[in-house]
Image (spheres, rainbow, N blue to C red):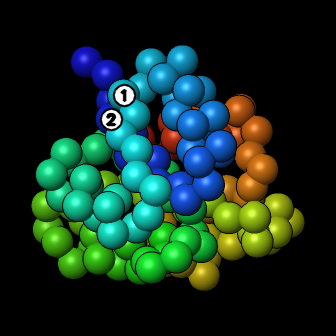
Amino acid sequence: MKKKILLIEDHSDLREATAELLQFYGYEVLLADNGLLGLTIAASQFPALILSDLRMPGMSGYELFERLQEDMRTAAIPVILTSANFNRNTVAYKEYPGVATCLAKPFDEDGLLNAIDIALK
């Protein structure tokens, strides 16, 4: 059975490219272009992992994470945040307690897959 990953990204080109990559590696990918839609999908589909952009209009990735934590049905879903504003030389996720990890964009295939493997364990 394929593991479901919810991909929340407001930039359509990056969303589609990342979805194709994840599908190639055997994941079932659920897509959302904003945090509110992502929250709705997470609460109904219960993905194994959420990969979300940090900075999005309406609801940021961290606001999404906080809302997921408030619901006992979604609180255990690991969340990986992505952002072009993370510095690869810092441990940015320490600013976001409870988040599985953070990836700087653009992320490479190996880095993304490794972060997903670690978060799913």
Q: Splitting the image into 4 quarters, where does residue 75 fall?
A: bottom left
Relative image position of residue 17 (x, y in whole percent): 63, 34
- Residues at circles 2 and 1 in contact by the CB criterion of under 8 Å: yes
What residue is at 52 percent from the left and 76 percent from the top? 57
Q: Name the outermost residue toward the right.
A: 89
Query: Mark 2 belongs to which amino acid?
Result: Lys
The one nearer the camera, 16 or 83, is 16
Q: Splitting the image into 4 quarters, where does residue 48 fall?
A: top left
Query: Mark 1 belongs to which amino acid?
Result: Glu
The one nearer the camera, 83 or 76, is 83
Relative image position of residue 40 (x, y in whole percent): 23, 61
The residue tagged 1 is 28
Residue 17 vs 62, above or below: the answer is: above
6 sits left or right of 83 in the view: left
Crowding at dot 1, Cα within 10 Å, few <14 / some 14-19 / many 20+, comes out as some
Whether residue 101 is visible? no
Residue 10 vs 62, above or below: the answer is: above
The tag on residue 51 is none
Label 2: element kind: strand
The residue tagged 2 is 4
Quadrant holding the C terminus: top left
